[in-house]
């Protein structure tokens, strides 16, 4: 959550009133008086002795200062309660929450959802329901005992399998599960169905199985939602009202983007973004809605069964389409130390070639997971033909599926064909499966901070428009909230500031010499949903 501005009234440190106000005033007063014993003005050494720590005047001034500190602490506490961003739990919920969002208005915990592969005799029916807790739906549980139900009725196909979408009956982050985990059916299992199903990988998100499970809304998230409610008043089905309804449908919804009359008069297109699980390993599609989130929002907002939308409205609920943006960034950090570039001479560190912005260093061919080649005109540090062991450059590879860097265990790097090709030998295979075109950068122990800063920047973006500016529908179907107000759709040099800020004093400057895409395209068909920029490939080099 964005840190609130500093308070607009003066706050005194302990002892500041005593020393700068009371004791200063006391000393000035003594300078205007005459010593009755000598008939002369008080000397400075006499004044200092009379007001030194431990003196009667000092003790009195210290007591006044201590009392003032206690009163100030009380005033600070009360002032904090006025601002939802600073308010404590009870004031946040019982005052601000009740006032702006209603009683007991924290978003409830949600259950994860996704696909499983079920097996059985062809034609076997797995009953589903979008109503969580429906007694007729097939129910199963994971290894931790948490329950899930089938959301849509499906038949086992001719090959004896069916892909079922399931959603959590139980809620919380623990309902998120990895691909390959077994779900054991317990209730309403068809007679010809096998008793187990296997969680499938989410399309476009390698390593992600069931997603969208969240614990109850945190205090900071709740405070931010109150602020949004204060700034964007929901009423009469306006876009802020649709945002409220979407979050009523599922606490996993971060934001609903509204495109009024995008299809025709009386139609509304709503694009959903999901909250990101902060304790996961990232990923460019972490904010794209899970199947169960879309199902819940669709059921709640789509007429004629919607309890909120008018009966004759045409409502289309969907998620955005990913458009990756590849980037190259140069960072000014110290070299050869922790907290900066690990090597004294970071490698690779390409310079722009004639007619090019900058060279992108990436894997050109792979022999095995411990042996690959880099196609590059770069030379090794010092012009060496081969560097091995502790002399070998420390490098890292970008994992675009997780939006994270991984350090490679380099055994040696050989300048196989000078000016053309490098051969890299690893002492052990990385966790990531290496592939052609994977991006290679010099290693820094700030790799996670850098990756998270990039991910955080893209998390501030929202989907683009559904129609072109030249389209007659552009004015009426413009995205709300407008990109110029909240969740901009464009990416650019602002990401450099984000990364430098995240690194604190480690990086003094950054540039963005290459970005493959700065804004999303207009979709070919509105029903495909708006495009949204996501983090693609990434290189970081010294500046």
Image: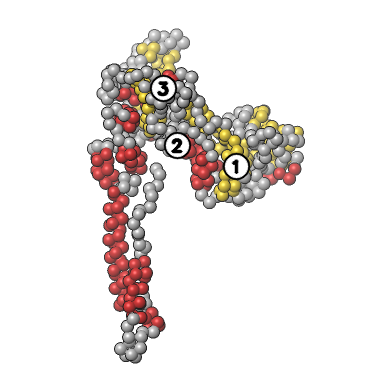
Tell whether 224 sits left or right of 280.
left
Give the residue at x 40% y 16%.
194
Q: Which residue is mark 3?
A: 473
Tell whether 541 sits left or right of 93.
right
Please tell me whether mark 1 sits on a helix, a strand or a loop: strand
Above or below, 137 against 75 in this view is above
Please tell me whether mark 2 sits on a helix, a strand or a loop: loop
Q: Nearer the viewer, mark 3 or mark 1?
A: 3
User: Looking at the picture, how far across and down is residue 99, in whole percent?
Assistant: 24, 40
Please tell me whether mark 3 sits on a helix, a strand or a loop: loop
Q: Please tell me which of labels 2 and 3 falls first in the chain.
A: 2
Give the residue at x 29% y 73%.
60
Cα gap from disc 3 to disc 1, whole angstroms: 41 Å
Give the residue at x 36% y 12%.
125
Q: Please tell me which of labels 3 and 1 falls first in the chain.
A: 1
Cα gap from disc 2 to disc 3, whole angstroms: 26 Å
Disc 2 + disc 1, Cβ < 8 Å: no
Q: Which residue is mark 2?
A: 460
Q: How is the image coloured?
A: secondary structure
Q: Which residue is mark 1?
A: 330
């Amino acid at each position: 959550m964005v840190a609130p501005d500093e308070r607009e009234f003066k706050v005194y440190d302990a002892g500041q009133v005593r020393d700068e106000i009371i004791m200063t005033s006391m000393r000035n007063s003594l300078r205007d008086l005459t010593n009755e014993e000598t008939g002369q003005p008080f000397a400075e050494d006499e004044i200092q002795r009379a007001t030194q720590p431990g003196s009667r005047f000092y003790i009195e001034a210290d007591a006044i200062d201590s009392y003032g500190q206690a009163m100030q602490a009380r005033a600070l506490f009360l002032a904090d309660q006025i601002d939802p961003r600073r308010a404590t739990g009870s004031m946040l919920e019982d005052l601000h929450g009740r006032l702006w969002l209603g009683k007991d208005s924290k978003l409830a915990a949600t259950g994860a959802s996704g696909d499983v592969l079920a097996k059985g005799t062809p034609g076997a029916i797995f009953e589903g329901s979008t109503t969580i807790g429906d007694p007729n739906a097939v129910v199963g549980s994971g290894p931790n005992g948490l329950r899930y139900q089938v959301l849509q009725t499906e038949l086992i196909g001719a090959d004896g399998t069916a892909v079922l979408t399931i959603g959590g009956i139980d809620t919380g982050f623990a309902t998120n599960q990895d691909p390959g985990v077994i779900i054991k059916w317990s209730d309403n299992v068809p007679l010809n169905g096998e008793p187990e199903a296997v969680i499938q990988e989410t399309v476009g998100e390698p390593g992600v199985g069931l997603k969208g499970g969240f614990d109850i809304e945190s205090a900071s998230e709740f405070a931010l939602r109150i602020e949004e409610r204060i700034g964007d008043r929901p009423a009469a089905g306006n876009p802020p009202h649709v945002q409220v309804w979407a979050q009523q449908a599922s606490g996993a919804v971060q934001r609903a983007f509204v495109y009024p009359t995008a299809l025709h008069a009386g139609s509304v297109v709503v694009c959903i973004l999901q909250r990101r699980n902060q304790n996961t390993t990232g990923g460019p599609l972490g904010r794209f809605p899970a199947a169960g989130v879309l199902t819940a929002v669709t059921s709640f907002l789509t007429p004629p069964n919607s309890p909120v939308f008018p009966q004759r409205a045409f409502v289309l609920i969907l998620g955005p389409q990913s458009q990756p943006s590849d980037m190259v960034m140069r960072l000014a950090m110290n070299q050869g130390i922790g907290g900066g570039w690990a090597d004294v001479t970071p490698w690779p560190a390409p310079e722009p070639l004639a007619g090019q912005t900058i060279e992108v260093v990436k894997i050109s061919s792979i022999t095995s997971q411990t042996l690959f080649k880099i196609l590059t005109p770069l030379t090794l540090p010092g012009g060496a033909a081969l560097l091995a062991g502790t002399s070998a450059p420390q490098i890292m590879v970008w994992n675009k599926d997780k939006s994270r860097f991984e350090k490679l265990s380099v055994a040696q790097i050989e300048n196989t064909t000078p000016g053309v090709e490098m051969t890299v030998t690893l002492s052990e295979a990385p966790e990531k499966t290496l592939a052609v075109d994977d991006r290679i950068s010099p290693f820094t122990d700030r790799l996670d901070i850098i990756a998270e800063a990039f991910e955080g920047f893209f998390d501030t973006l929202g989907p683009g428009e559904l129609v072109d500016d030249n389209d007659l529908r552009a004015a009426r179907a413009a995205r709300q909230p407008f990109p110029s107000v909240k969740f901009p759709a464009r990416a650019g040099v602002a990401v450099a500031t984000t990364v430098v800020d995240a690194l604190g004093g480690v990086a003094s400057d950054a540039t963005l010499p290459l970005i493959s895409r700065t804004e999303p395209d207009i979709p070919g068909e509105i029903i495909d949903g708006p495009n949204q920029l996501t983090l693609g490939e990434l290189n970081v080099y010294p500046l």
